[in-house]
Image (tube, grey):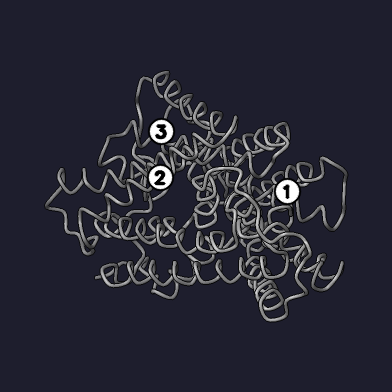
């Protein structure tokens, strides 16, 4: 008899994947990619390449998630493959780098576009980012009801904004700009892919809900394939709209590319209209990331003694209050770091990228380890063309890890340093970790 929790259909899962992945990145990263690509053709081809690499990763995740359906997702794979130490470091990385970095990335995009509505001077983006983190953390700490209400505005604003960009940029393009359409690449295409795959980031999060599929064997792969296809199509159309209106150099020079597109097409009112939609969208995405991150950190506190202060559930508000506060403080420190570096969004991408790709590489390796270590576990879905597909995923992840270290600045080194601090914390705790499953520590 199926348990009541198995409620996800293919349509539900595709909606989740598309909702997670199509977030704030598409309103910011194209400018950085355009500055590196060198030509309009290369710029546009890099986005389908990002979709293809995401698909390769999705096939690997589909096998892992179908064989080990658990809300723990990557944590579960690392624990079974490499032991509790690596699993702890992943949980630590989510607390200090990956999840908090994602919150701040969203907050900086919010700040850039909020500055289009109400300018506050040269530090406006950081001021808005910090204010958003504080307010959303407070809302999430008051009650679940408040946080879910905040989230409800996200999807509609995001879809409307993307439709406006695509329709105006492709079907109603303005006259070509007079500046040159191409520019010389000034950095490695590997760095461009770091930002593109950041924009695609999140498709693997469906693995955390693998235990909730109605028909895991049939539906997991279909959901990933359809989700990534839709995401790739949207990203290609949006970027085509950007270069159609602004030209490659105009995209590369823009800090707020969506607002600049609408400003050129419809004037200042158009820029403000799209900025309002993006502000709403990024606030909703940041709120959701704060919500899920706090619960992962709560589980970490329940499973590891030195961080037990995060493993307390606040009975009156029905929220993991200590985990929310800890996450908020770390995020605010990262806002200050991004502002100190004067690159905000870009600095935080560089901060998260090496750690993000390190654990992606370990996920690919874990597929090989578990095939050999645990051959008798049923695998409802097996990755096609094994071992070539997971080898390709591992090679791509290794290349992205190398690129995120070689072509980033202090931000990347800072992220690696914080991960290494996790090793010290683990050793200070005597190497004792608990198992985190279903959001609880055992």
**Residue 247 is drawn in which quadrant?**
bottom right
Residue under pointer 1: 132
Residue under pointer 3: 89
Q: Secondary structure at mark 3?
A: helix
Q: Nearer the viewer, mark 2 or mark 1?
A: 1
Taking the spot 53% from the left edge, 42% from the top edge, the residue there is 313
Q: Secondary structure at mark 2?
A: strand
Residue under pointer 2: 440
Q: Real-space Cα distance between discs 2 and 3?
A: 17 Å
Which of marks 3 and 2 precedes in the sequence? 3
Counting from the top left corner in percent of width and height, residue 71 is at: 38, 53
* CB within 8 Å, label 2 to label 3: no
Which of marks 3 and 1 precedes in the sequence? 3
Q: Real-space Cα distance between discs 2 and 1?
A: 29 Å
Taking the spot 72% from the left edge, 44% from the top edge, the residue there is 134
Taking the spot 64% from the left edge, 67% from the top edge, the residue there is 152
Q: Residue furthest left?
A: 376
Q: 176 or 147: which is nearer to us?
A: 176
Q: Residue furthest bottom?
A: 171
Q: 193 or 437: which is nearer to us?
A: 193
């Amino acid at each position: 008899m199926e348990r009541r929790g198995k409620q996800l259909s293919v349509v539900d899962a595709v909606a989740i994947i598309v909702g997670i992945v199509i977030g704030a990145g598409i309103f910011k990263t194209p400018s950085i990619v355009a500055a590196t690509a060198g030509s309009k053709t290369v710029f546009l081809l890099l986005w389908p390449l990002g979709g293809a690499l995401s698909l390769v990763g999705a096939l690997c995740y589909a096998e892992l998630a179908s064989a080990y359906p658990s809300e723990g997702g990557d944590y579960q794979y690392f624990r079974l493959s490499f032991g509790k130490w690596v699993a702890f470091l992943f949980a630590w990385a989510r607390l200090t780098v990956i999840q908090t970095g994602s919150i701040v990335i969203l907050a900086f995009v919010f700040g850039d576009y909020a500055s289009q509505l109400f300018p506050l001077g040269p530090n406006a983006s950081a001021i808005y980012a910090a204010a958003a983190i504080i307010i959303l953390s407070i809302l999430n700490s008051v009650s679940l009801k408040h946080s879910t209400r905040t989230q409800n505005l996200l999807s509609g604003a995001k879809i409307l904004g993307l439709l406006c960009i695509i329709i105006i940029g492709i079907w109603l393009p303005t006259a070509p700009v007079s500046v040159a359409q191409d520019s010389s690449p000034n950095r490695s295409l590997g760095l461009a892919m770091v930002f593109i795959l950041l924009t695609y980031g999140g498709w693997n999060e469906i693995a955390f809900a693998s235990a909730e599929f109605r028909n895991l064997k049939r539906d997991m792969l279909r959901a990933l394939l359809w989700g990534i296809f839709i995401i790739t199509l949207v990203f290609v159309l949006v970027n085509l709209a950007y270069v159609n209106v602004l030209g490659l150099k105009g995209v590369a020079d823009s800090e707020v590319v969506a607002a600049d597109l609408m400003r050129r097409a419809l004037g200042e009112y158009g820029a403000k209209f799209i900025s309002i939609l993006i502000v709403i969208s990024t606030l909703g995405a940041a709120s959701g990331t704060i919500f899920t991150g706090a619960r992962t950190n709560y589980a970490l506190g329940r499973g590891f003694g030195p961080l037990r202060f995060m493993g307390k559930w606040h009975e009156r508000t029905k929220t993991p209050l200590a985990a929310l506060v800890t996450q908020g403080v770390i995020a605010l420190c990262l806002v200050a770091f991004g502002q100190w570096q004067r690159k905000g969004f870009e600095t935080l991408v560089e901060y998260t990228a090496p750690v993000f790709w390190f654990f992606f590489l370990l996920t690919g390796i874990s597929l090989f380890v578990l095939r050999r270590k645990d051959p008798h576990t049923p695998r409802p879905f097996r990755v096609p063309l094994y071992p070539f597909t997971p080898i390709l995923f591992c090679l791509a992840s290794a290349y992205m890890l190398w690129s995120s270290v070689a072509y980033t600045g202090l931000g990347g080194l800072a992220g690696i340093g914080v991960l290494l601090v996790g090793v010290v914390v683990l050793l200070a705790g005597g190497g004792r970790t608990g198992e985190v499953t279903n959001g609880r520590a055992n």
